[in-house]
Amino acid sequence: MRIIVVDNYEEMSKRAALMVASQVTLKPDSVLGLATGDTPSGMYKELIKLYNKKEVDFKEVRTFNLDEYYGLNPENSQSYYKYMMNNLFNSINISTKNINMPDGMAKDVDDFCSLYEKKIKTLGGIDMQVLGIGGNGHIGFNEPNINFEAQTHLVNLDEQTIEANSRFFKSIEYVPVKAISMGIKTIMNSKKIILLANGLNKAEAIEKAVKGKINPSIPASILQLHNDVTIIIDKEAASLL
Ligand code: F6R
């Protein structure tokens, strides 16, 4: 694990955007794994700036998102589809046919999940996966005590996650209780991983993920076994290391 501690959120976002942009420059048809939430939104802003300066071109890039709430229509303002369109895809030259998101409205979820996995494999696997981390140590929506062998599947959201994410909804009752998420195995099969975290509320999860025992109770701890993980965190998230 390579750990880069930076001063603040802005620095974290810039460093991460440069890593993604370098990946795309070296391999224009890179397969990127993408996350949503507050953590990567600054990185997406920086990527848009680099794109506007013509320093990166997304024409051939293919993307797979980590997760999507189950039961939310893509047009719902809180869907991760909307998040990705608003935070990145609408502002760069990615081709719509190259965007892959879990379908929160899938009728046959198992079928959808196995097709998602198959598509990732057919395209040669994920070259670079961007991750955030939950306060409970989750990555994607792989909540504590997840099976490390799981691939893309339907998950039950942890109470802590539902509460944390209720900040985006009218009230907690509106937060979906299930999601479709890439599994730990899907994430671990990525060639490179960047994990971002900022703020004191992530410090304990980062400490356990980096220094703790590899244990399904902290899903992110499995990353200790991956051979190409870069963790970019601000001073606050690094405060317990
Ligand atoms: C989102 C995702 C989640 C988030 C995590 C942190 O696609 O996979 O694991 O990265 O819940 O969320 P924020 O960044 O909002 O603190």
Image (tube, rainbow, N blue to C red):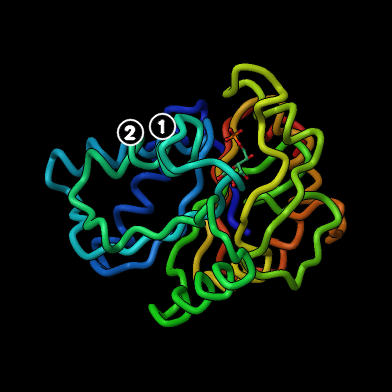
- Residue 19 sits above or below residue 9 on the image: below
Give how far across and how far down residue 144 sits, in percent. 82, 50
Callout 2 crowding tier (Cα within 10 Å): few <14, some 14–19, many ≥20: some
Q: Quadrant of ligand 1?
A: top right
Taking the spot 59% from the left edge, 31% from the top edge, the residue there is: 198
Residue farthest to the front?
A: 107
Report how far apart the C-alphas of labels 1 and 2 lie in the structure: 5 Å
Residue farthest to the top?
A: 170
Taking the spot 33% from the left edge, 33% from the top edge, the residue there is: 45
37 sits to left or right of 43: right
Identify the element where label 1 is drawn.
helix
In terms of depth relative to the viewer, which is nearer, 230 or 100? 100
Asked if residue 64 shows in the view, the reply is yes
Q: Amino acid at mark 1?
A: Gly
Callout 1 crowding tier (Cα within 10 Å): few <14, some 14–19, many ≥20: some
In terms of depth relative to the viewer, which is nearer, 115 or 35? 115
Residue identifier under label 2: 45
Give how far across and how far down residue 44 sits, in percent. 36, 39
Taking the spot 76% from the left edge, 56% from the top edge, the residue there is: 221
Disc assigned to residue 42: 1
115 sits to left or right of 124: right
In terms of depth relative to the viewer, which is nearer, 142 or 42? 142
